[in-house]
Image (cartoon, grey):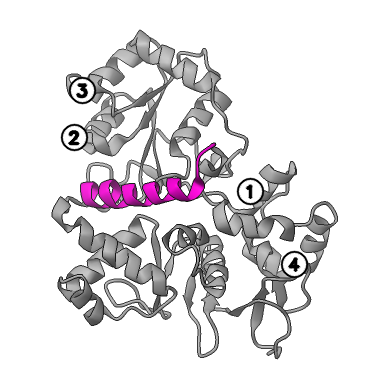
Amino acid sequence: MESFFKTHKYLVDHLYSPVRRGLMDEINWNDRLIGIKGSRGVGKTTFLLNIAREHFGADNKECLYINLNHFYFTERTLIDFAFEFRAKGGKVLLIDQVFKYPNWSKELRYCYDHFKDLKIVFSGSSVMRLKEENPDLSGKVSSYHLRGFSFREYLNLMSGNEFPAYTFEEIMQRHQEIAQRICSVVRPMAYFQDYLHHGFYPFFLEKRNFSENLLKTMNMMLEVDVLYIKQIEQSYLPKLRKLLYLLAISAPCTPNISQLSKEIETSRATVMNYIKYLTDARLMSMLYPVGEEFPKKPAKVYLYNSNLMYPIRPEEVNVQAVRESFFFNQLIKDNQLNEGNKNIQFLVNEKYNFRIEENIRIKNNPDWYYAVDKIEIGETNIVPLWLFGFLY
């Protein structure tokens, strides 16, 4: 146990986390079992360590971070460890890589039922279905999703500011006022293209080649977050990788399921399941007409965020696709997005028809809204595209 405390202290003392994530304030800390899901690379481990630092500090042994990848847990159970931790005065157990541990959901449920003075916060892959696929945790776990950096978080980090987030309705009603306030302090367009290229994943701060790092991360999403968790045979990995590539080079697109099934030599049903897995892994996003959802074929598929476009075909990136993916990605957290009518990319919250444009040299339809790339401040129904990066 003492070695785990030493590791915990070292990690918290040496934690580099320049951005305080907004999720920290969304969590109900009165809950005793909290799951933090997120795609690989968005900073789940850092988030857990930030909980320790912010609420307890490095030296307080009432809180402990552990990684279930540790070989210790090949011999000892999580239940035994939690029991011993409590006996030593422990109150909060932060558990990383929970899905690598067999019977993790059953043992978490046991801890929840029997150790009522112990709070457990654990991290897991976005592919995990904590409640749907784990009846042990149904009604017991409070699940949250940690996303990559918003443009707001990236801008705050790079410019040294502390701009707040806004709701979608606040932006729609007051976008000129909000944009003017931000632009009076900083020029957001000076940072926007860099964000679209590499700002979503916090590991851009590491002194490594970002594109190579992102490619490795994407492959790990396929090999671990999809194959391992969904228990798909390793031999099917080439089909999954090819499907991702075919969708990525044409996104946004309406997927031709029959053609894709021929290309990767599998059934139509399997193609649809694979697209769902890629969506769960936060590699793709599916856009549906109002009232439709999986398992129906999506109207369009997008890459989940704009950063993912650049490593796959860096010399052939579709700039309009980048804009649309950014808009989709930043809004999807708290809003409903559906396929728009003809000439409209998105219907937001079944109320706002949105076109995503490069500039304002367009015929303005008063019934539509325009998210426009190359402007700092908008007017009436024309909103700067970058401003939708301030939603979280």
Q: Name the kind of residue labelled 2 in the image.
A: Pro
Q: Earlier in the sequence, mark 2 or mark 4?
A: 2
**How many neighbours does mark 4 have within 10 angstroms: few (below 14), some (14-19), or many (20 or more)?**
many
> What distance separates the C-alpha of mark 1 from that of mark 4?
20 Å
Front tag of 1 and 4: 1
Q: Evaluate if marks 4 and 3 touch, with contact meaning CB atoms under 8 Å apart.
A: no
Q: Name the residue: 33% across, 35% down.
A: 97
**How many neighbours does mark 3 have within 10 angstroms: few (below 14), some (14-19), or many (20 or more)?**
some
Q: Name the kind of residue labelled 1 in the image.
A: Tyr
> What distance separates the C-alpha of mark 1 from that of mark 3?
40 Å
Front tag of 1 and 3: 1
| Secondary element at image label 4 | helix
Q: What residue is pinned by disc 4?
A: 175
Q: Earlier in the sequence, mark 1 or mark 2?
A: 2
Please tell me the numbered disc located at residue 154.
Answer: 1
Residue 147 is one of the magenta-drawn residues: no
> What distance separates the C-alpha of mark 3 from that of mark 2?
10 Å
Q: What residue is pinned by disc 3?
A: 77
Q: Quadrant of residue 278?
A: bottom left
**Residue extent of the magenta highlight:** 207-229
Q: Earlier in the sequence, mark 1 or mark 3?
A: 3
